[in-house]
């Protein structure tokens, strides 16, 4: 599924002059946000190794502007959960998500983060969307680095379609 | 909190968590520390943040279905876990593997050991601040991933062995691909050694930090490179050889002090030794059958299945029930990248394992970590955590 | 064969060179020693023939014998495992067993001790003072099976979270019965116990905020 950016002509506005300024500001802000994502790698298990593979020079996430990994939620805007989340880890994940400032996006990377993977047992959370809202899910066990990059690209597409007015209304 | 130190003065201690969301993706550990300034005075370590129920899940499926779970134990060297488990299960049957299978398994084991050490060293160096090595070593890991992909389709979690042999024979250019990768690995190791071995910053950060004496390491149950870094010359490949390791020529790398520097350098030198073993194994690789022909483990050939009633029934039972080891208990050990990886298997003669206990090599290392970092600085704790190579998948199962 | 010393950085205290590993005793001889000295009996279930069953009252003596006797020298406790024989076909006898895997760095021999305990009195003496690793290994066995290790200083959960009720590896614990965690274990008490052990006296406790309890959004069909 590809997120198509909202065409500027569809954005409802009261008078033309205001709309012109708002959509131009949107375009610039979204351009800045999507090309300088600072990921927080919440890497718990094997998927984190493929995340590291994505950061390495072979797959090079810095082409997308997202190589500056930040291990503080205050400084990051893209939370990538790569690996299994257990119930012991769940409050930690929630706290990290809550500490992140808007705008923030979440990638659930791998089968375990998306659905619990094949660990259908007493200790694993069956998908992190029980805990936090997710923007993009990546299938794979572990997903290839190219799949991680596709996820980042889809986040970028999603960001392109955002409008500041909507965000202020939602409080996102 | 305010506390009176053993020396008698009053200290204002700060409590701080290292983890469970930990930089440098070392996995999910929590070290709860009490700090006097920068110095750690007490620790309470916690684990289990990645406890995924391996030992419960494998009881739900067959023996062959255990293999994907074993991949995700030490996910940096997944093939070693596959091979270790298959070795234990084959030991229960008492089956002899063909020569080619053993040689291929040794090549895969040593290559997995190499890439595990590569990732351990480079992430440890990232913690210390030496970022360049991460890219140098990860590119070599990618080279080996290409071989893994051609071999079995997966880069990281391979599930490449089966009880009684391998998933499939190696592809025709396997030997030349592996030979092509090894010089790159040696070159990367040379580059990294050039950057760190005589680098004053690195030496000051790691020399005489978190020393673990030989007696302590033994009592903590340490095995593998961490034990050898403390000066204890024990390696399962030499002490209790399997798969013909006694016929391979390689050195055991031993440290002198048991500090962080020794642990890192032991792994770097072990990469060189493993490269030597792979060369020797490649020279011995001869054509032949890759799987055992034991009817309890491997399906008969299609021709036999179509023409022989016994073979048909055998095929049917292996597909529907899987392998059934004899009832009993069996422990087998394997020299994995972190140390002795053991599987204690209890079989009730049925299709599903009754109990499998994984003896994780890094659990002993992490159990000692709390005591190891007390009286060291916080920065030293970060530098030393990488040196004991905790892989949470294996630690927590 | 030892080798590859990365020599020129070593300071004064180099580890003394160890002798090469010795062959050790045969498994028949080991079983004989344990049977005669500790009234142990060989476990016929072990396919290797290196497991002996000892009574729990004799466990500490057995472990000391194995560790300190000059021709045994089992100086490494590899692991402690629990077993629940509840669903084992044809099993008669105590429900649980605690299995101790030993190894030696002096000899190549290995031995496994097994202590069988009943369900209603599942307790075994702790050996945490004999092997440093036994502390955590016993915690894990208690966590997963509920076998109590008498004398253990800190028998807390190791793998499962602190709000978990039950012992998940027991055969009567359903595999998919999930238990959610609301707040992480603060562990202040364990830290203060450790400070006390190291000679510190806590005069003023810090302020601790436990954090808001977690709520989970159950997906349709996920809860079992």
Image (cartoon, coloured by chain):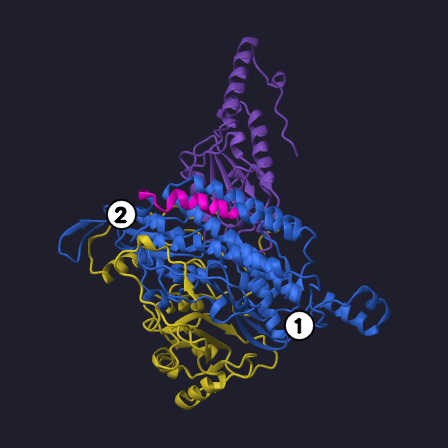
Chain colours: A purple, B blue, C yellow
- Asked if labels 1 and 2 share a chain, the reply is no
Q: Which residue is drawn at the image coordinates 54% and 59% (left, top)?
A: B277
Seen from this angle, which residue lies furthest bottom?
C36
Residues packed near mark 1 inside 10 Å, few (<14), some (14 to 19) or many (20 plus): many
Q: Position of residue A98 (x, y in %)?
A: 43, 39
Question: Magenta includes C184?
Answer: no
Q: Which residues are drawn in magenta?
A: B185-201
Position of B316 relative to B371 (above/below) = below
Q: Is residue A10 left or right of residue C165?
A: right
Identify the main secondary structure in magenta: helix
Q: Which residue is drawn at the image coordinates 41% and 63% (left, top)?
A: B364
**Mark 1–mark 2 contact, CB under 8 Å?**
no
User: Within the image, what quadrant is residue C86 found in?
Assistant: bottom right
Identify the chain of the residue marked 2, using the numbered disc in the image.
Answer: C
Q: Position of residue B232 (x, y in %)?
A: 37, 66
Q: Position of residue C67 (x, y in %)?
A: 36, 77
Q: Position of residue C152 (x, y in %)?
A: 34, 70
Residue where numbered disc 1 is placed? B324
Identify the chain of the residue marked 1, using the numbered disc in the image.
Answer: B
Q: Which residue is drawn at the image coordinates 43% and 41% (left, top)?
A: A96
Residue A136 visible here: yes
Residue where numbered disc 2 is placed? C207
Position of B111 relative to C116 (above/below) = above
Question: Magenta includes B198?
Answer: yes
User: Within the image, what quadrant is residue B329 found in?
Assistant: bottom right
The numbered dot on residue A140 is: none
Residue A92 visible here: no
Residues packed near mark 2 inside 10 Å, few (<14), some (14 to 19) or many (20 plus): few
């Amino acid at each position: 599924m590809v997120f198509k950016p909202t065409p500027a002509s569809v954005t409802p506005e009261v008078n033309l002059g205001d709309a012109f300024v708002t959509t131009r500001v949107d375009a610039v802000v979204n351009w800045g946000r999507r090309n300088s994502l600072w990921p927080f790698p919440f890497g718990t298990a094997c998927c984190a190794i493929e995340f590291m593979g994505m950061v390495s020079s072979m797959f090079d996430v810095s082409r997308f502007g997202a190589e500056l990994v930040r291990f503080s939620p205050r400084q990051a805007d893209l939370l990538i959960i790569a690996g299994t989340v257990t119930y012991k880890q769940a409050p930690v994940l929630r706290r990290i998500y809550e500490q992140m400032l808007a705008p923030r996006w979440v990638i659930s990377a791998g089968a375990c983060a998306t659905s619990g993977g094949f660990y259908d047992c007493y200790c694993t959370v069956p998908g992190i969307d029980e805990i936090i809202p997710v923007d993009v899910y990546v299938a794979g066990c572990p997903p290839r680095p190219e799949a991680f990059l596709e996820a980042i690209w889809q986040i970028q597409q999603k960001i392109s379609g955002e409008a500041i007015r909507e965000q202020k209304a939602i409080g996102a | 909190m305010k506390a009176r130190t053993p020396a008698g003065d009053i200290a204002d201690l700060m409590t701080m968590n290292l983890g469970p969301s930990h930089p440098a993706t070392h996995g999910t550990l929590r070290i709860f520390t009490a700090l006097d300034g920068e110095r750690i005075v007490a620790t309470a370590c916690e684990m289990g943040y990645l406890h995924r129920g391996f030992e419960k899940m494998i009881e739900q499926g067959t023996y062959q279905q255990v293999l994907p779970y074993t991949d995700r134990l030490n996910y940096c060297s997944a093939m070693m876990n596959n091979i270790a488990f298959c070795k234990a299960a084959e030991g229960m049957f008492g089956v002899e593997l063909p020569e080619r299978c053993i040689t291929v398994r040794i090549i895969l084991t040593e290559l997995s050991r190499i890439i595990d050490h590569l990732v351990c060293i480079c992430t440890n160096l990232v913690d210390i601040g030496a970022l360049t090595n991460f890219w140098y070593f990860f590119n070599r890991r990618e080279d080996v991933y290409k071989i893994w992909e051609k071999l079995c389709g997966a880069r990281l979690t391979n599930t490449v062995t089966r009880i009684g042999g391998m998933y499939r024979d190696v592809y025709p250019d396997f030997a030349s691909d592996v030979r092509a990768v090894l010089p790159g690995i040696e070159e990367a190791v040379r580059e990294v050694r050039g950057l760190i071995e005589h680098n004053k910053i690195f030496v000051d950060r790691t020399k005489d930090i978190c020393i673990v004496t030989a007696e302590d390491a033994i009592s903590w149950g340490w095995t593998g490179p961490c034990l050898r870094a403390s000066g204890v010359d024990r390696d399962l490949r030499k002490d209790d050889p399997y798969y013909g390791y006694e016929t391979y020529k390689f050195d055991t790398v031993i440290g002198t002090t048991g500090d962080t520097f020794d642990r890192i350098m032991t792994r770097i030198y072990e990469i060189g030794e493993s490269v030597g073993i792979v060369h020797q194994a490649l020279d011995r690789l001869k054509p032949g059958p890759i799987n055992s022909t034991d009817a309890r483990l491997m399906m008969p050939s299609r021709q036999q299945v179509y023409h022989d009633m016994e073979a048909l029934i055998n095929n049917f039972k292996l597909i529907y029930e899987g392998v059934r080891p004899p009832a009993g208990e069996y422990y087998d050990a394997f020299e994995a990248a972190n140390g002795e990886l053991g599987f204690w298997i209890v079989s009730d003669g049925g299709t599903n394992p009754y109990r499998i206990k994984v003896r994780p090599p890094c659990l002993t290392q992490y159990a000692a970590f709390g005591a190891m970092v007390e009286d060291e600085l916080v920065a030293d704790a970060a530098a030393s955590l990488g040196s004991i190579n905790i892989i949470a998948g294996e630690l927590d199962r | 064969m030892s080798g590859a010393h990365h020599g020129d950085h070593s300071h004064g205290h180099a580890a003394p060179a160890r002798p090469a590993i010795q062959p050790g005793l045969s498994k028949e001889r080991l079983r004989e020693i344990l049977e005669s000295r500790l009234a142990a009996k060989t476990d016929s279930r072990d396919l290797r023939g290196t497991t002996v069953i000892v009574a729990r009252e004799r466990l500490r003596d057995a472990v000391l014998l194995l560790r300190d006797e000059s021709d045994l020298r089992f100086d490494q406790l590899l692991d402690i495992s629990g077993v629940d024989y509840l669903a084992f076909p044809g099993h008669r006898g105590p429900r649980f067993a605690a299995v101790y895997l030993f190894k030696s760095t002096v000899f190549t021999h290995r031995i496994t001790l097994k202590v069988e305990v009943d369900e209603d009195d599942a307790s075994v003496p702790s050996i945490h003072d004999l092997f440093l690793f036994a502390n955590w290994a016993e915690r894990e066995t208690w966590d997963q099976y509920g076998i109590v290790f008498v004398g253990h200083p800190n028998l807390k959960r190791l793998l499962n979270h602190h709000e978990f009720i039950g012992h998940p590896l027991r055969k009567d614990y359903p595999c998919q019965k999930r238990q959610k965690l609301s707040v992480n274990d603060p562990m202040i008490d364990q830290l203060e116990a450790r400070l006390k052990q190291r000679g510190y006296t806590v005069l003023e406790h810090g302020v601790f905020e436990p954090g808001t309890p977690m709520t989970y959004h159950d997906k349709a069909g996920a809860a079992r």
